[in-house]
Image (cartoon, helix red, strand yellow):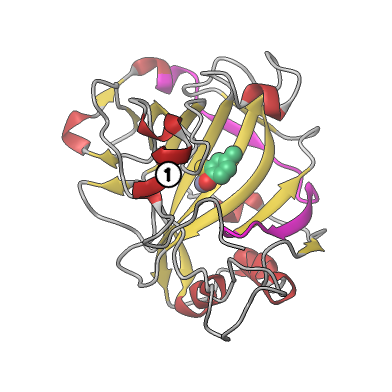
Amino acid sequence: MSLDWGYTDDNGPSTWAEKYPLAAGARQSPVDIDTSKATSDNSLVDREIDWSYPSNCSYRIVNTGYGWRVDTYGDDTALSGGPLSEVYKLEQFHCHWGATNDEGSEHTVDGKSYAAELHLVHWNSEKYSSFKEAASQPDGLAVLGVFMEIGNADNAELEKIISLIPKIIHKGQDSQASFDLDFGSLLPESKHYWTYLGSLTTPPCNECVIWTVFKEPITISERQLEVFRSLKSVGEEDAIEPEEGKLVKNYRPPLPLGNRVLRECGP
Ligand SMILES: Cc1ccc(O)c(S)c1
Ligand SMILES: [Zn+2]
């Protein structure tokens, strides 16, 4: 069964608006971060962005057909400050990558792509009663974007996720993910970032996200990235050829920033 949307020539980002009209909106993500357009804002400095994630909040990893996603218990998590007016809870995290290391991130910086981009997805639990309700609101979600560049060594915390990928090679497969994860190692040391109002980067592309994209990347090894690329977008019963349906890329190219404000915190 063919996917409703995906990242092939037939169902990729240029076709999404045919079935998901929001994808053609004026507040879409990702964007190219034109650093010359970023404006400093002291309010971002006055209320430092802050997060708290218990190391045992992950419980499941699933192959969505578009990548891997780790689901989390949000009750004891919190993201606040910076561009956020309320406290947001962590719902899930996932990653976007490319077929080669010179592409893969969704946001770009002055036209430069990174090899991958980690997204930590949170919802506004102060104002809304569920993730689903929040995802229909302009301030419903807060996503932290973390660039990933190729490094020589494996990322030890990412390895805990990567070690489970062989259990979820096919779309729809899932596995318990009760690892002890140091989220601090999945986020950069520097809290410098860009922020703007945008959307989900996958259909239905709801314009509900307050984006925070960190300036400093974390590292991932080539081997680890190859494991991401071994995931398949088709179910076990669908695969015909061994190479068919490999998820070698799952990133959306940048959309116009338009008249949106791009703010930055830190040099
Ligand atoms: C909620 C959600 C789902 C998928 C995504 O890529 C993003 S960025 C957010
Ligand atoms: Zn994403």
Q: Is residue 167 left or right of residue 45?
A: right
Residue 125 placement: quadrant = top right
The residue drawn where x is 72% and y is 61% is: 172
Looking at the image, which is closer to me, 34 or 154? Answer: 34
Looking at the image, which is closer to me, 32 or 252? Answer: 252
Q: Is residue 123 left or right of residue 262?
A: right
Residue 114: tell me if it is visible.
yes
Is 52 placed above or below 181 here?
A: above
The residues colored magenta run: 44-67
Indicate the quadrant containing the N terminus: top left, top right, bottom left or bottom right.
bottom right
Looking at the image, which is closer to me, 182 or 96? Answer: 96
Q: Residue furthest left?
A: 36
Residue 230 placement: quadrant = bottom right
The residue drawn where x is 27% and y is 30% is: 257
**Residue 252 location (% of width, % of height):** 39, 50
The residue drawn where x is 71% and y is 56% is: 181
How many numbered markers are drawn? Answer: 1
Q: Which residue is mark 1?
A: 16
